[in-house]
Image: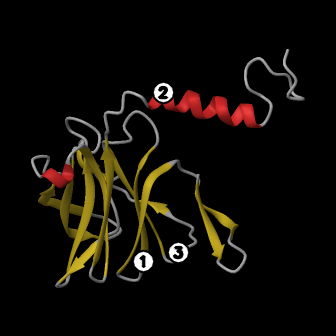
Amino acid sequence: KLSCYEYLPEEQKLIFLQTILEWPVMDPTVLKFNNKYWIFGTLYGKSSRRNLFIFFSDNIMGPYKQHPKNPVTNSLNGSRPAGNFIRVDGSLFRPAQNCENRYGESITINKVSILDEKNYKEEPFMQIAVNKEKKSNKGIQTIHTINALGNMIVVDGEKRIFYPFSKIKHRVVKYFKGYRQGQAPGFNDTGSKL
């Protein structure tokens, strides 16, 4: 299900408002366009990286209808959402993940040319990929999401670090935490030696 929550900053908690869609939508992206609310996302399951679905409503809380062309795309490159829509000079762009060869290989920016209750059309506009030859990008393997607000751009991805002693360190830390709490191997729950 896709649910809507309200965040109360003073109390630092979320309050459930209602279920928006009964569908298992992954990476949902909400867009207000031409006096309608649109939800873009892939559905959980075998084709979660391939098939893009659109739902629309007059109200952000719904009820939502399925777009008649669903799934509107069927490709490992450019279907699964990768961030909020971008508006530039009256044009609408939709970031999407490129999972053709691997998950998060790059981001495809699609230019939307038609979006209404009967039709949808987009075309690849550009690719954003990790420059793995750049020294500051060492270890960064994938890129999944891009969002922009004002003059700030935020991306997320995956960075792998070769750290052969991580398992040993984890066990040592776990041992000493247990030792301080009287739970280390060889001790019972009172801290007495067995």
Residue 14 spot, x, y in % from top left: 67, 67
Query: Which of the 4 image quadrants contains residue 127?
Result: bottom left
Residue at mark 2 to residue at mark 1: CA–CA distance: 51 Å
Which badge, 1 or 3, comes first in the chain's sequence?
Answer: 1
Q: Is residue 69 left or right of residue 194?
A: left
Is the C-beta separation of discs 1 and 3 under 8 Å?
A: no
Total numbered circles: 3
The amino acid type found where label 1 is placed reads Lys
* Residue 42 falls left or right of residue 135: right
Residue occupying the far top of the picture: 194
Q: Give the mark nearest the N terminus, 2 or 3.
A: 3
Secondary structure of residue under mark 3: loop
Classed neighbour count for the residue bearing mark 2: other residues with Cα under 10 Å, few (<14), some (14–19), many (≥20): few
Locate residue 127 relative to residue 177 in the image: left or right.
left
Looking at the rendered structure, the kind of residue marked 2 is Lys
Q: Secondary structure at mark 2?
A: helix
Observer able to see residue 67: yes
Disc 3 target residue: 60
Residue 167: assigned label: 2
**Label 3, residues with CA under 10 Å away: few <14, some 14-19, many ≥20:** some
Can you tell which mark lies on residue 126?
none
